[in-house]
Image: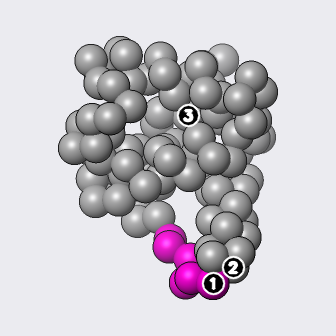
Amino acid sequence: MHYSVSHQKLKLLLAAQGLTTGDAGGIDQLFGGKDGYYWYGTLRDLCPEGKTISWNDQYEMVKAIQDHENATAAEDEMKPQVPSPANIAALSKLLANPI
């Protein structure tokens, strides 16, 4: 299965659930519960406005997200966060591309 993210896709995902970018609680739930809003923000930061990033499988997607998190945490001299299994399941469901 292929996966992709873009700012447009993220906006559509939120709109489909009746959420806005400021609805932290709703975004938390949509993106897997605890820290869901954090991973939503990470995706927005990972993908440049107007561009789409795609991956061939779930492992590539998770690795790209974690690599981005590791790099930004290093810049901020912080310990990187790791998405929970629930976050990964939600990201996989939301970012999957139908064939």
Compute the Cα span from label 1 to label 3. Answer: 29 Å
Q: Are dots 2 and 1 in contact, CB under 8 Å?
A: yes
Report the number of numbered marks: 3
Residue at the disc numbered 1: 77
Among all residues in the image, which is located at the extreme front?
76
Q: Position of residue 88 (x, y in %)?
A: 47, 54
Quadrant where the image shows the N terminus? top right
Compute the Cα span from label 2 to label 3. Answer: 26 Å
Callout 2: SS: helix
Residue at the disc numbered 2: 74
- Which kind of residue does numbered mark 3 sit on? Leu
Between disc 2 and disc 3, the foreground one is: 2
* Residue that appears at 47% across and 33% down: 94
Residue at the disc numbered 3: 95
Disc 1 packing (10 Å; few <14; some 14–19; many ≥20): few
88 or 46: which is nearer to us? 46
Q: Position of residue 69 (x, y in %)?
A: 63, 65
Q: Is residue 20 above or below residue 45?
A: above
- Which kind of residue does numbered mark 1 sit on? Glu
* Residue that appears at 56% across and 77% down: 80
Callout 1: SS: loop
Earlier-in-chain disc, 1 versus 3: 1
62 or 48: which is nearer to us? 48
Q: Position of residue 35 (x, y in %)?
A: 35, 59
Q: How is the image coloured?
A: one colour
- Which kind of residue does numbered mark 2 sit on? Ala
Q: Is residue 85 above or below residue 55?
A: below
Between disc 1 and disc 3, the foreground one is: 1
* Residue that appears at 46% across and 36% down: 93
Disc 3 packing (10 Å; few <14; some 14–19; many ≥20): many
Callout 3: SS: helix
